[in-house]
Amino acid sequence: MRDSLVETKSKDSRIVTRIKTKNISSKKMLIRFSIYLILLVHLVFTGYPFVWMFLSSFKFDSEYFSNPWGLPSEWHIENFITAWNEGISSYLFNSIYITLFSVIGLLIVSTCIAYYLAIRPFKGSKVLLGMFFLAMLIPIHSTLIPLFNMANKIGVYDTFWALFFPYIGFNLPVAVFLAYGFFKQIPKELEEAAVMDGCNIYQIFFKIYLPLSKPILATVTILSFFSIMNDFIFPLVMISDDSLKTLPIGLMMFKGSFSASYSLISAALVITTAPIIILYMFLQKYIQSGVVAGSVKG
């Protein structure tokens, strides 16, 4: 009798456990479905403007107004050719040139500073690191007038040099912060083994720390690329020569010249956003890992 009661209780407990497991699984599925639904709605709201812009760039103005939401009846590339020949090509080249050299300079300076602060600390290195952290709190545009006056005094106004140095300086605190946190997480045993093999500090930096820093370098690259490529106010103030205008300024001028042709403006916008989207597609896997790896340990 007692055995039958024990067996009945065990069966009941198994049934209850199964019911609880099913309820938990159902809740998890419901939560997962809700998350996917929210992400899908977000994707539609954020992604459709880009799809609409892309489709509009292949239409003529007549079809742009008669069929604004549908697919083009014919895929015309004349808008891209016209936008390219009307100056978008030179604006794009100027932006890529400025962004490329600014990012290269930023990577060189920030990794060297972060390496010495993290691996070769010296007296006052903590104070210097704190100054970099505080520099992230300074509003960038508050430096516009002083930098404009300085560029005039040293004779670099209306040249690319008036943008190179500010862009490197503006992005330097964040780059140093991320690289510093990453370098601090690299095991010291690697450096000690390299020293025993006869490597000096430069060989350790170039052969150990830099090759291991690809995620953080990619993160700094894409974050600074976006901020520099999309900057509007500094090229507007520092550059007056039309041949040196960057892409955001060029788009404003292009829109003023072709304000009645929305399909042509759409083609120009597609050309503008293409480099950023392509870069993000190649480097997106490094962004999250780089930011997480670059967080400073207590």
Image: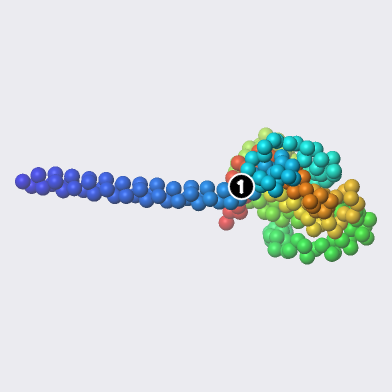
At a point 21% along the width and 48% down the height, the residue shown is: 13
Looking at the image, residue 139 lies above or below residue 198: below
User: In the rendered image of this protein, does residue 113 appear above or below residue 60?
Assistant: below
Q: Amino acid at mark 1?
A: Gly
Q: Which residue is mark 1?
A: 47
The residue depicted at 60 percent of the width and 41 percent of the height is: 285
Tell me if residue 214 can be seen: no
Looking at the picture, how far across and down is residue 241, in whole percent? 91, 52
What residue do we see at 5% from left, 46% from top?
A: 1
Which element is circle 1 on?
Answer: helix
> Which of the pair 9/29 is nearer the observer?
29
Judging depth in this view, the residue of 240 and 75 nearest the camera is 75
The mark total stands at 1
Please state the horizontal and vertical placement of residue 235, each as a whole percent of the image. 83, 54
From the image, which quarter does the C terminus lie in? bottom right
Whether residue 11 is visible here, answered yes or no, is: yes
Above or below, comparing residue 284 to residue 249 in the picture = above
Residue found at the very far left of the displayed protein: 1
Judge by depth and name the residue closer to the eye, 65 or 195: 65
Q: Residue at x 57, y 48 (%)?
A: 44
Left or right: where does residue 45 sit relative to residue 276? left
101 relative to 290 in the view: left or right? right
Indicate the position of residue 58 as horizontal and vertical percent values.
71, 40
In-front residue for pair 237/124: 237
Q: How is the image coloured?
A: rainbow
**How many neighbours does mark 1 have within 10 angstroms: few (below 14), some (14-19), or many (20 or more)?**
few
